[in-house]
Amino acid sequence: MRVLTQPLYDPLEVLTECISGISDHALVAKFQAFAPSHLVQAAEYVDKAHSANLYKFPSFQGGKADVVTFGVTKGEFYSLYAQYFVGKNKTARVYYDALMVSAPNQKCPYCGFGHVYTLDHYLPKAKFPQFSTLIVNLVPACRDCNEGGKRTSTAALAAEQPLHPYFDRAPFYKVQWLFARVVESTPASVEFYVSCPLSWSAEQQKRVRAHFKAFNLKKRYAVEAAEELSTLSPRLKTYHLHDSIDEIRKQLNETLAIERAKHQNSWMTAMYAALINNDWYCGGGFAL
């Protein structure tokens, strides 16, 4: 879970650049008629995103040949994105490229560890085709979060909405809500879970749980943790086998302090905190 700076490109400018690549005059006319409405909806999107009300936008249930608005079909909105926004030889491609490199260290903001590979439509274009090229609806993401995460599912309630990297801030990124527990097995493993502060509203607590579930983070974080433990445990066994529990904790805390300073809710922060607090692991479980 990472915060991204909201891109501030003019939505009308982006749409106009996309339209400029279309040679079909009739299609151009339809998108030009749609443009004023797009500008209004873009402002509405931002307002709803700030108040966690994006779920209130009605979803489109038709097929690709069905008209969404102003005579523009769902399929034509799809093509606007795929051909004229993403298309490598189109002038609007500059926006796609800018978004693709906007995530710090090219890490996916949804999971925090995957490499950015594509753009995710926060409100899926299958249900909200009118937002196919709306910049603030496009989030740089890894393949797993985009294709294997929420996919085309939509929230029916505010509490069901995953976190939006451009708009969600405090309290989600200020305090720790992602935790882990050590499984005292051979070799040791780690399980991840969500535990929110009691001061949070029920909606806030449900939203982080929805995010955790939508992107399958329990399983995916466990895989990352297993890889980390496969390196950490042999290192402790080789160089610190005879150290006291307190000395082992000191070694682990060096990594935790660095990671926690960067991200309160990374799987690394949760895992190292769990290891430090586990007497079995620090007392020699790492060597099994």
Image: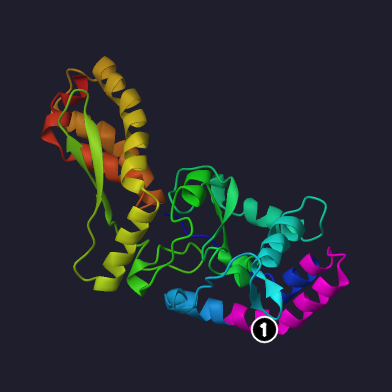
Q: What's drawn in magenta, residue-wise? A: 18-43
Question: Quadrant location of the N terminus?
Answer: bottom left
* Magenta span contains residue 160: no
When asked about the image quadrant of residue 70, the answer is bottom right
The answer to whether residue 12 is seen in the rendering is yes
Give the overall secondary structure of the magenta segment. helix
Which residue is at the front of the view, 1 or 96?
96
Against 282, residue 48 (above or below) is below
| Residue 128 located left or right of residue 24 | left
Q: Circle 1 sits in a helix, a strand or a loop, which is it?
A: helix
Q: Is residue 272 left or right of residue 26?
A: left
Q: Quadrant of the C terminus?
A: top left
Residue 203 relative to residue 152: left or right: left
Q: Is residue 20 above or below residue 247?
A: below
Residue at 27% across, 23% down: 233
| Location of residue 183 with respect to 155 vertically, above or below | above
The residue drawn where x is 45% and y is 53% is 110
Q: Residue at x 67, y 62 (%)?
A: 78
Q: Give the image location of residue 119, x and y in percent.
A: 59, 54
Say how many tags the image has.
Answer: 1
Across and down, in percent, residue 246 comes to 16, 32
Q: Residue 56 vs residue 206: left or right?
A: right
Across and down, in percent, residue 176 comes to: 29, 56
Q: Is residue 257 visible?
A: no
Give me the residue at 62% from left, 72% from top: 130
Is 9 situated above or below 273?
below
Compare residues 240 and 75 and report the one nearer the observer: 75
Residue picked out by circle 1: 37
The location of residue 222, given as percent across then percent down, is 31, 38
Name the kind of residue labelled 1 in the image: Ser
Snapshot quadrant of residue 56: bottom left
